[in-house]
Amino acid sequence: MICKLSDKKNNERVVLINIKGGYGVYQRLLDMGLVPGVTLEVSHNHGFGPITISLKGTKIMLGRGLAEKLIVKEEKNSEKN
């Protein structure tokens, strides 16, 4: 299911598919490693305030407004060989 990052709950793993925003927002997120196709995990989201995500072993805190610009989908559970 496709939705905004701000709609996801704690411990959910998702794949970033799009960034809705202008050049400045897009560039800022790219600089943080948030590029389309990357898998991330929601560490802390209580429905208000900032959202904390885990990306490649690093925790990143995003304001709710910024998190609403990230369009994500659920990660498909596939085993890697």
Image (cartoon, rainbow, N blue to C red):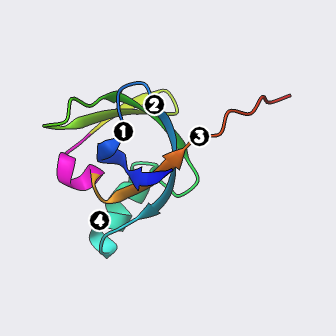
Q: Residue at x 29, y 45 (%)?
A: 6
Q: Which type of secondary structure does the marked residue at label 4 adopt?
A: helix
Q: How far apart are the alpha carbons under marks 4 and 1?
A: 20 Å
Residue at 43 percent across and 30 percent down: it is: 58
- Label 2: state its secondary structure: loop
Residue where numbered disc 4 is placed:
25
Pointer 1: residues within 10 angstroms few (<14), some, or many (20+)? many
Q: Position of residue 17 (x, y in %)?
A: 52, 58
The residue that label 3 is drawn on is 75
Vertical comparison of 24 with 66: above or below: below
In this image, 55 relative to 66: left or right?
Answer: right
Amino acid type shown at disc 3: Glu
Mark 1 touches mark 2? (CB < 8 Å): yes
Q: Are the residues at dot 4 and dot 3 in contact (C-beta closer than 8 Å)? A: no
Task: Give whichever of discs 2 and 4 has the lower sequence position.
Answer: 2
Residue type at mark 1 is Lys
Which residue is identified by label 1? 8
The disc, 3 or 2, on the residue closer to the chain's N-terminal end is 2
The residue that disc 2 covers is 12
* Mark 3 → mark 2, Cα distance in angstroms: 9 Å
The span shown in magenta is 62-67
Q: Position of residue 16 (x, y in %)?
A: 49, 52
